[in-house]
Image: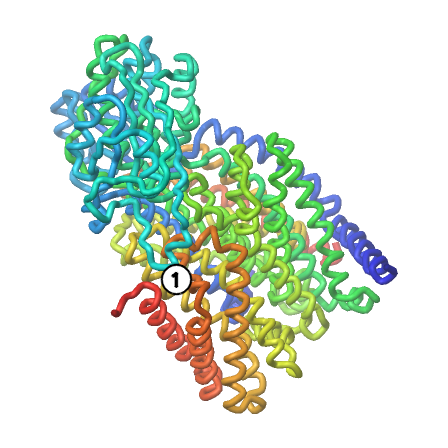
């Protein structure tokens, strides 16, 4: 294998890509996914979190209280988010239907400390996003009431849970796990998938457009063509992944261990690219190769994800800065796998060359 | 009858060829491997479902002095747990995210510390629930139960159009008194309709599910196994978890099959192989239909098979049908436009991601908001949940799919000709070619009208997508983003046809003709918009979002002037500066459009 020929094949394919400019679509796609998933998270949270929306936090929702007197009524009256009206049930439900109330609560005459459960009936508007918001707000009060009732009945509990006290005032952090544990691993995994799909296209295209003969009539060998293409696909991986890391950092999401992450991403991308190359060399036809490859990848990914310290898990750990020695063990394993697959690809390409193109 | 029979026989001949061809390709080598992989897939899915997905293993470090506490959290793989006495914990403080000593929880003041605390408190909640559901006296552990009764709002939602505010937050402090008739509501029964053991079994059943979802958000909960009868912690809007997984099962095979069709179309273009097909007496529509038929039948069969397998009613094929058509129509065009395999891959991956988002995301809200009906998949969720939907809901969520598929197939048929199939120009210019061959230069006004009327379903689709995307954001921000992006999409759609005409033959279009063409475009757009609204009106116009997207039905003059002004601005820039004028033209038109919406609909700037 000559380095010059490798570089030639690589340059030819990369130039083809940049000329078509469809790689832009791939990048747009990744942006789209990132934007969408963040929208989903941020949006959902701010929708239900009263603090996030200052304009809604001052709104007091009208709640009708019907039925018997109970401590729940006091709990509702203490909460500044509600304005409680004592009403007749039929009147209240009619007012709810006219959107003059946010919810109606009916409390029966059940002994709070007795043996029967307290069964509250709650009327809300059907299929309405604001009704969902009110339900979430009422949930807090009802949870408190559940706690009070439970305290009244505590004598009757036969197993007591181990008591652990959490600090009273805590800012919860919903995004951290989503960003580091899901978004970043998936984003960094996408370049691998894209490159692996690309190698199949690059190889089958030479077969199906009958351009391979032309290529091989030059001093270039089959193995050089295949490895040149593999390199072209591989080189795109750190470029895309690196762009992501820069973008995330610019977005004030600090990422630790960037070099190690890139090494991991490149190593497992190479595994996928090599599997793609072998599939493409075997089938020489895009439909079959892509179909078999994508099914195989789904199987492989699902299997790998069932184990701790899989590459995606590892990226999460590296990005948060808690990865230990295991990263090097995994890297070693993946590198060995690459060596094996690389040897197989090389041998396969050589065999094809020796059999001639007709086979 | 004879010509129809002839066409049918042509279609069936081509369908038979297609089957033989695809089996020739898939042949001996692929099928055994595919079967093997499929078996592996089933096995691995079971294995992974059993083991769980390990994405966040070992993210947090927890230190504790109590072995009992260590045992509680030991089952959560996210925590690496260190057990030691107080001094050891103190020494290792810097590397620990959370410390539990003497029953008190201390978290480090960092993002990771807070995230660990959140995760920990959810775990603790689950642990307590699991203890409680084993209590002898279940009603001592769960003393409070809530029966949710939905009430239908009787206000006419079309009222928003006349500017009435629809909010359940009260505008006045007056005591709420119903104005309409009051129906007597029977006093609810205080008794519980389930036995204690039923409740106990149901409670422990949902606990496992809950923790998986709660990792990412606390806001969507699980469904109560007792329907509307819930404990307080189940009051979050439920995520139809099982149904959504089932949907993936249905959609996934559709992607694969449409890929095959896409590739089959592309294959005809390789080395002009399709010339054989084009030289047969069968016209392009027969060729396209014949090639699509096997894949269409395959998709229906696969979906029916899956439905039988999961014991879902076959009725779910009804909302799936337009989705299948849409996939095939898009596959046809993607196969016809792309120049190379790489391009085919990129475009099809892009398309399938966007389509999945459009189809999939709204169905998450199936139980929460009417917006979810944008996607036909919501109808599938409803069917799976055993709920019925009305004909108007069906029309609302599927009409766009039917219409866009029809248009895409039409464009495909019109362009299924030698000079288009075997040309190798770039993506944008190919699309322009496609547009330009769909327009007739002998009847520019007529074709402008038809083209623009037919783009409206696509515009609606794009705007629905934007709506779904933005409706989550806090209120003023979501409105502004929607305002700008919806106007932008609309202006681009209106400009496509007229710009193509102007760029193809600028000399044929003196200024008076530019004005006339803009008027025709605006009229077509308005006409199609109103027509489509008649079908879909009741579902979406109820919200303030709806009124931005779809100008009010009543007045016609102002919306016409707006559409006209928008097209005219873009067209004039293009006529004046050529291709370079397009971008500034579009931006200016969007600005005008936004200002109009802000002024007339939202009443800002006054």
Residue A26, horizontal then vertical, whole percent: 47, 59
Residue at position x 37%, y 59% from top? B162
- Chain identity of mark 1: B
Residue at position x 66%, y 57% from top? B263
Q: Which residue is mark 1?
A: B548
Residue A293, horizontal then vertical, whole percent: 59, 47
Q: Is residue A349 left or right of residue B351?
A: right
Q: Is residue B340 above or below residue B144?
A: below
* Other residues around mark 1 within 10 Å, as few (<14) / some (14–19) / many (≥20): many
Residue at position x 23%, y 17% from top? A150
Residue B10, horizontal then vertical, whole percent: 82, 59
Q: Is residue A328 visible?
A: no
Q: Quadrant of the N terminus of chain A?
A: bottom right
State how the image is colored: rainbow
**Residue B56, picture quadrant:** top left
Q: Is residue B489 left or right of residue A197?
A: left
Q: Is residue B133 above or below residue A41?
A: above
Q: Is residue B55 left or right of residue A57?
A: right
Secondary element under disc 1, as helix, strand or loop, is helix
């Amino acid at each position: 294998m000559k380095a010059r020929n490798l570089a030639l094949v690589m340059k030819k394919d990369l130039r083809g890509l940049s000329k078509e400019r469809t790689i832009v679509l791939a990048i747009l796609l990744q942006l789209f996914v990132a934007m969408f998933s963040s929208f989903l998270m941020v949006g959902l949270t701010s929708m239900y979190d009263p603090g996030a929306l200052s304009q809604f936090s001052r709104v007091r929702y009208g709640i009708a209280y019907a039925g018997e007197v109970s401590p729940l009524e006091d709990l509702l009256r203490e909460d500044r988010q509600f304005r409680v009206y004592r009403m007749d049930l039929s009147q209240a439900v009619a007012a709810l239907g006219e959107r003059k109330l946010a919810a109606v609560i009916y409390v029966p005459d059940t002994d709070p400390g007795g043996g029967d459960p307290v069964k509250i009936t709650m009327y809300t508007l059907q299929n309405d996003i604001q009704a969902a918001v009110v339900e979430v707000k009422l949930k807090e009060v009802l949870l408190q009431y559940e706690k009070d009732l439970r305290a009244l009945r505590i004598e009757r509990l036969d197993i007591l849970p181990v008591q652990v006290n959490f600090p009273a005032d805590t800012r919860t952090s919903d995004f951290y796990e989503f960003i580091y544990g899901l978004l970043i691993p998936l984003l960094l995994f996408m370049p691998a998938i894209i490159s692996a799909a690309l190698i199949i296209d690059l190889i089958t295209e030479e077969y199906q457009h009958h351009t391979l003969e032309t290529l091989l009539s030059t001093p270039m060998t089959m193995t050089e063509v295949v490895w040149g293409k593999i390199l072209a696909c591989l080189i795109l991986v750190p470029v895309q992944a690196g762009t992501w890391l820069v973008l995330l950092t610019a977005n004030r999401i600090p990422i630790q261990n960037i070099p190690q992450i890139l090494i991991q991403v490149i190593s497992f991308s190479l595994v996928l690219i090599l599997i793609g190359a072998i599939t493409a060399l075997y089938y020489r036809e895009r439909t079959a190769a892509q179909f078999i490859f994508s099914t195989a990848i789904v199987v492989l990914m699902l299997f790998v994800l069932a184990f701790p310290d899989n590459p995606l898990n590892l990226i999460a750990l590296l990005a948060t800065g808690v990865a230990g020695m295991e990263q090097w063990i995994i890297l070693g394993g993946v590198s060995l796998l690459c060596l094996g697959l690389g040897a197989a690809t090389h041998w396969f390409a050589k065999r094809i060359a020796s059999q001639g193109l007709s086979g | 009858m004879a010509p129809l029979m002839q066409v049918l026989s042509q279609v069936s001949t081509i369908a038979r060829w297609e089957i033989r061809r695809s089996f020739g390709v898939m042949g001996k080598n692929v099928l055994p491997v595919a079967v093997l992989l499929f078996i592996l897939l089933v096995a691995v899915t079971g294995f992974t479902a059993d083991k769980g997905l390990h994405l966040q293993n070992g993210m947090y470090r927890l230190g504790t002095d109590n072995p009992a506490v260590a045992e509680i959290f030991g089952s959560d793989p996210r925590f690496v747990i260190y057990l030691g006495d107080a001094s050891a914990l103190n020494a290792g403080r810097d590397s620990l995210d959370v410390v539990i000593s003497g029953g008190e929880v201390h978290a480090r003041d960092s993002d990771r510390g807070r995230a660990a605390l959140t995760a920990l408190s959810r775990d603790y909640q689950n642990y307590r629930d699991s203890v409680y559901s084993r209590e002898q006296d279940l009603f001592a552990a769960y003393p409070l139960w809530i029966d949710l009764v939905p009430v239908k709002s009787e206000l006419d939602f079309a009222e928003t159009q006349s500017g009435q505010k629809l909010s359940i937050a009260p505008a006045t402090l007056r005591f709420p008194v119903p104005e309409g008739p009051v129906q007597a509501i029977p006093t609810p029964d205080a008794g519980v309709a389930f036995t204690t053991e039923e409740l106990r079994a149901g409670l422990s059943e949902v606990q496992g599910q809950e923790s998986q979802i709660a990792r990412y958000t606390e806001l969507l909960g699980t469904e109560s196994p007792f329907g509307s009868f819930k404990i307080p912690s189940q009051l979050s809007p439920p995520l139809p978890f099982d149904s959504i997984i089932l949907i993936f099962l249905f959609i996934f095979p559709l992607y694969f099959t449409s890929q095959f069709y896409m590739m089959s179309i592309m294959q005809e273009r390789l080395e002009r192989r399709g010339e054989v097909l084009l030289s047969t007496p069968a016209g392009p529509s027969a060729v396209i239909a014949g090639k699509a038929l096997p894949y269409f039948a395959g998709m229906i069969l696969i979906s029916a098979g899956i439905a039988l397998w999961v014991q879902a009613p076959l009725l779910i094929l009804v909302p799936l049908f337009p989705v299948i058509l849409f996939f095939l129509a898009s596959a046809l065009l993607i196969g016809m436009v792309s120049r190379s395999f790489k391009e085919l891959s990129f475009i099809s991956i892009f398309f399938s991601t966007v389509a999945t988002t459009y189809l999939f995301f709204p169905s998450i809200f199936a139980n929460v908001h009417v917006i979810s009906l944008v996607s036909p998949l919501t109808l599938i969720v409803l069917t799976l949940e055993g709920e019925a939907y009305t004909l108007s809901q069906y029309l609302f969520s599927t009409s766009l799919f039917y219409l866009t598929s029809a248009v895409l197939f039409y464009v495909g048929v019109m362009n299924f000709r030698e000079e288009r199939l075997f040309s190798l120009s770039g993506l944008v210019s190919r699309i322009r070619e496609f547009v330009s061959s769909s327009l007739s230069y002998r009847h520019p006004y007529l074709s402008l009208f038809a083209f623009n009327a037919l783009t409206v379903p696509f515009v609606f689709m794009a705007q629905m997508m934007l709506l779904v995307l933005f409706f989550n954001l806090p209120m003023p921000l979501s409105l502004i983003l929607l305002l700008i992006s919806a106007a932008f999409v609309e202006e681009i759609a209106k400009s496509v046809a007229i710009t193509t005409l102007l760029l193809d033959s600028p000399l044929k279009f003196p200024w008076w003709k530019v004005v006339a063409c803009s008027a025709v475009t605006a009229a077509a757009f308005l006409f199609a918009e109103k027509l489509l609204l008649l079908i879909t009106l009741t579902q979406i116009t109820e919200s303030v979002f709806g009124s931005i997207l779809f100008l009010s039905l009543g007045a016609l003059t102002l919306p016409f002037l707006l559409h006209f002004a928008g097209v005219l601005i873009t067209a004039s820039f293009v006529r004046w500066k050529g291709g370079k004028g397009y971008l500034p033209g579009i931006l200016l038109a969007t600005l005008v459009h936004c200002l109009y919406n802000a002024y007339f609909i939202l009443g800002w700037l006054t």
